[in-house]
Amino acid sequence: MLRGLFLFPWIVPTFVVGMLWGFMWQKETGIINIILYDILQVHTWLGWLGVTADKPFWLMGDPKTLAAIIIPTVWRGWPHPMLMLLAGLQGIPHDYYEAADIDGANGWRKFWYITFPLLKPVWAILLLFGLIFNVYAFNIVYMMFGNGAGFPGEWGDLLMTNIFRNSFQRWDFGTGAALSFLLMVVMMVIVNFWYKFYKGVEEG
């Protein structure tokens, strides 16, 4: 049951996630501001965290916009690495930990010398997948800012939304094509470096 609940964010389509979190981030009616405002009445120390009696509009062009994008993106994507890391942990022979217990190793040493090295192939794959998925992130931001009609500002304008806006809203296909080409080149370079790193992990 718990694993099913943990997988729930991954089951929900990304455009639905964008719509739901867009409503949740609203200034007056959003559930997040309502909860923060109620907590502030009891815990005034939240002012140090930037939470004040003036309810913020998270979808405006300031640093809070980036947080409003990162949080639902992480919520939507974390079940995938959870599953892969769980599979990797289940694949580690228990004999290694028994031998470490006999040698008197504590939990930190067992993690650093057994768990972490044996999970290298898993988190190397997750690193690549996470990089690609986040660089090409589009649906959540597209839906959070009014189906792409709104401009998220400099703090929330991701590369993919910028390409989309230039190509299909401003009809500036030259800028959109140039950005797309540069993105492809940069990703090819990054993947090449990752492949060399991953090859070293496999050989190691």
Image (cartoon, helix red, strand yellow):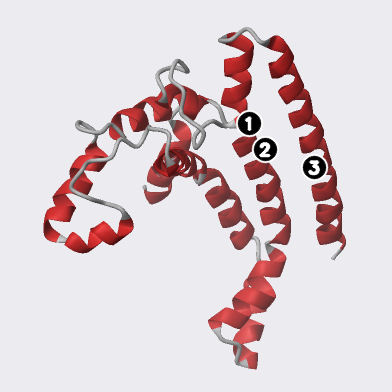
Side of 169 where 184 appears, left or right: right
Amino acid at the residue labelled 1 = Tyr
Q: In this view, does 186 lie above or below 93?
A: above
Question: Between disc 3 and disc 1, whose residue precedes?
Answer: 1
Q: Residue furthest left?
A: 41
Residue 63 image point, x, y percent? 44, 43
Query: Mark 1 and mark 3 in contact (Cβ < 8 Å)?
Result: no
In the image, what residue occupies the spot 51% across and 41% down? 77
Residue 141 image point, x, y percent? 48, 28
Residue 86 image point, x, y percent? 56, 56
Q: Distance between the residues labelled 3 and 1?
A: 14 Å
> Is residue 99 at least partly visible in the picture?
yes
The residue that mark 3 highlights is: 191
Q: In this view, does 104 lie above or below 175?
A: below
Residue 19 image point, x, y percent? 37, 25
Q: Is mark 3 on a helix, strand or loop?
A: helix
Please rate how many residues cluster around mark 3, counting C-alpha atoms within 10 Å: few if below 14, some from 14 to 19, many from 20.
Answer: some
Query: Mark 1 and mark 2 in contact (Cβ < 8 Å)?
Result: yes
Q: Distance between the residues labelled 2 and 1?
A: 6 Å
- For this rendering, which residue is in front, 126 or 186? 186
- For this rendering, which residue is in front, 116 or 21? 21
Side of 119 where 165 appears, left or right: left
> Is residue 93 at least partly visible in the picture?
no
Indicate the quadrant containing the C terminus: top left, top right, bottom left or bottom right. Answer: bottom right
Question: Between disc 2 and disc 3, whose residue precedes?
Answer: 2
In the image, what residue occupies the spot 78% across and 24% down? 181
Q: Hey, which quadrant is residue 80 in on the image?
A: top right
The residue that mark 2 highlights is: 132
The residue that mark 1 highlights is: 136
